[in-house]
Amino acid sequence: MIKIKKANEADIEVLALLGRITWAESHGHYLDDKNTLLKYLDENFSVNKTTQELNDSNKLFHIMYVDDLPVGYVKLVVNATQENVASQNSCRLERIFILNDFIPLKIGKQLLTFVEEQAKALQLDTMWLSVYIKNNRAIRFYEKNEFKNVGELNFIVNGKSYENIVFSKKI
């Protein structure tokens, strides 16, 4: 059974661990050395950093469970603008991550639909996100789900720039 619930203070450790593992699974192989990866994970997926983000009212987290196991999560940043997105009433889908072992269940679409409904309920009209140009699986997923390439941005990891595509979708 699949369940999606809004994350709260009791979920901080689960969110931090899910974030760390899923980011390493989906992006870790793009980084040149393991120390760069570990530094990035330590800075961005610590319990302290996750607590700060969860307490930010513009950042909404939801966890996806399969048979009561936390297997993925989304992070939606409300009222996040981007120069290539015309809407001033937009949000950024900053993270939509699922553990590799659960990707074959094809539950990503369900999580995306859920977060789109959450954004609509907040009366937002556009969702945007960025994807690393070499992440072909994610690019195909967003294109299949009607996101359009509207530009690019650089994502910095420990001082090194990685070219990303900016995708946008009216919701």
Image: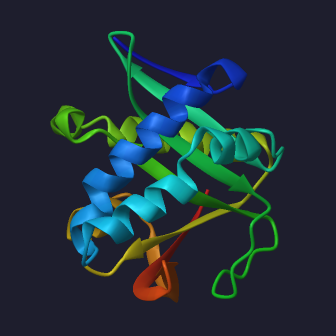
17 or 39: nearer the viewer: 39
Q: Residue at x 28, y 63 (%)?
A: 28
Q: Is residue 143 visible?
A: no
Residue 141 x %, y %: 30, 59
Q: Residue at x 61, y 56 (%)?
A: 171
Q: Is residue 111 visible?
A: yes
47 or 104: nearer the viewer: 47
Q: Quadrant of residue 67?
A: top left
> Above or below — where is 107 with respect to 77?
above
Residue 110 x %, y %: 40, 35
Horizontally, residue 29 falls left or right of residue 107, namely left
Q: Residue at x 66, y 80 (%)?
A: 85
Residue 161 x %, y %: 45, 88
Horizontally, residue 117 falls left or right of residue 148, namely right
Residue 61 x %, y %: 63, 38
Question: Exactly how many numbered labels are in the figure?
Answer: 0
Q: Quadrant of residue 70?
A: top left
